[in-house]
Amino acid sequence: MNLIRSYISSFLSRKGSYVFLATAFARILSFIASWLALKLIPNKELGVVLFAYNIITFLIPISGFGLHQSLIRYGALIKTTEEKNSLFLYVLKKGLLASLVLVLIIISVSYFIDFKFENTFTYIIILSFIILPSFLYNIIRNQFRLQHDNQTYAYIDAVHSVIFLLSVFTLSYFFQEIGYAIALIVPPLLTSILFIKKLNIDFSSKIKLSITNFSFWKYGFFASLSNVLTQLLFVIDILLIGYILEDTELVTNYRYISLIPFSLLFLPRLFIATDFVTFTENIFDKKYTLNYIKSYMLFFFIISSFILLFSFLFAKQILTILDPNFTIYVDTFLILMVGITGIYIFRGIFGNLLSSIGKAHVNYYIASLALVINIIANFFLIPLYGIKGAAITSAILMWLTGIGSLIWFKILYKKIK
């Protein structure tokens, strides 16, 4: 139990409680904003905006060609404040330029696509520009993390959430669907403007860093691609259920049944967000790293045990809250709950440790293989078991990708001197 107490104490000392509260606050306000949009905008028009936004959402992780990912990893390894600030300026300049190139590519490619829904191209043009402020927003947050200022990092998320809610309500009320599209761009832009001065960076600094080489760009690009593929893994089931079973009701059922399991994945993410800079700074201290791994895995093994026990005891009651008709899918729900514990115990820590030692491309390879297996397995299991087949595939892959991350980290970490 000493390991658990020490782990939680360290998490709290790094202002992890602020990150937790900001995350919970953001989820609540995001839900309210989504509900307001649904009330203020006709479903048909809102659906077109959301369709276009879902396309852009997949591309946001590769904004700046992933340089925000490089910033947080390489920034944790360099020592002086001047070097960290110079790295931020390099990423700011190159990343915004790369993001603009990405926006132009999106608009150019979309021009030649015959979208099924009217005005989709218009909304893609508008929403593609969210890539620029989103990149700026991410690097500002990461810079505060590099300064070990998780409290301000949490405040940024909270301010972003408030601006998002106000923007959605105001712009959707006056300008309907166009207003909603613009409201998605406003929060990262305004939040970035409010907080960039608080970084106290000398923007005239011109220190040249040797780390900003090909490896620096490669790391960020593969780390971002890995995030894109991971997102795709969570939605591919829904796409394949609709394609194979041709039943929109089953698509809806699976989406809501998986809502709670997938929402619970925020917990390891917020711990990693709080701790990533610290354990990356100490990644070459093998004693420290091993102790952190033991503490993390023990903590999330206990959390996973409680979650599974609660789920198996009250699965029907949980699903009844969503919809009484969902109780026939108890098995599907429990399978997904078992699956997420694989991410809790293994993938959450070892995927990020691979990134910490500069092997983000390994995460990309693991996610790519998982995506292929997911598609093949679902074509066999969904016709046999319906949406339970999709849940079985996802649960198995959550564990396999986690164990795969563990194996690769163990192999690669031994080679570090």
Image: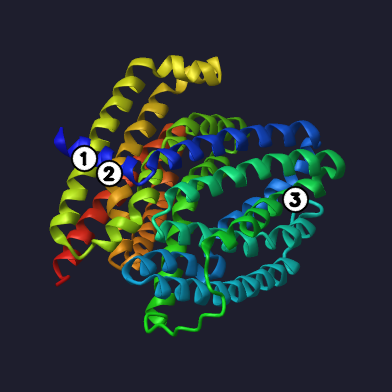
Q: Residues within 10 Å of mark 2 (few under 14, many from 20)?
A: few
Residue 380 percent across, percent down from the top left: 40, 44
Mark 1–mark 2 Cα distance, whole angstroms, equals 6 Å
- Tell me the distance, in whole angstroms, between the alpha carbons under discs 2 and 3: 40 Å
Secondary structure beneath label 1: helix
Q: Name the image quarter holding residue 173.
A: top right
In percent of the image, x 49 and y 29: which residue is there? 257
> Is label 1 in contact with label 3 (beta carbons under 8 Å)?
no
- In the rendered structure, are the residues bearing label 1 and label 2 in contact, judged by CB atoms less than 8 Å apart? yes
In the displayed structure, 67 sits above or below 198; it is: below
Amino acid carrying mark 2 in the image: Ser
Residue 78 in the image: above or below residue 318: below
The answer, for residue 384, to whether it is visible in the render is: no
Query: Which element carries disc 2, helix, strand or loop?
Result: helix
Mark 1 / mark 3, whichever is N-terminal: 1
Q: Is residue 198 or residue 142 the one in the foreground? A: 198
Give neighbour class at mark 1: few <14, some 14-19, many 20+ (Cα, 10 Å): few
Give the residue number, with chain letter if any, for mark 1. Answer: 6
User: Disc 2 marks which residue?
Assistant: 10
* Residue 264 in the image, given as x and y percentages of width and height: 42, 35
**What is the total number of numbered labels drawn onto the structure image?**
3
Determine the residue positioned at 45% across, 74% down: 87
Q: Determine which residue is flagged by label 3.
A: 181
Of helix, strand and loop, which one carries label 3? helix
Mark 2 or mark 3: name the one nearer the start of the chain.
Answer: 2
Under mark 3, the amino acid is Ala
Quadrant of the image for the C terminus?
A: bottom left
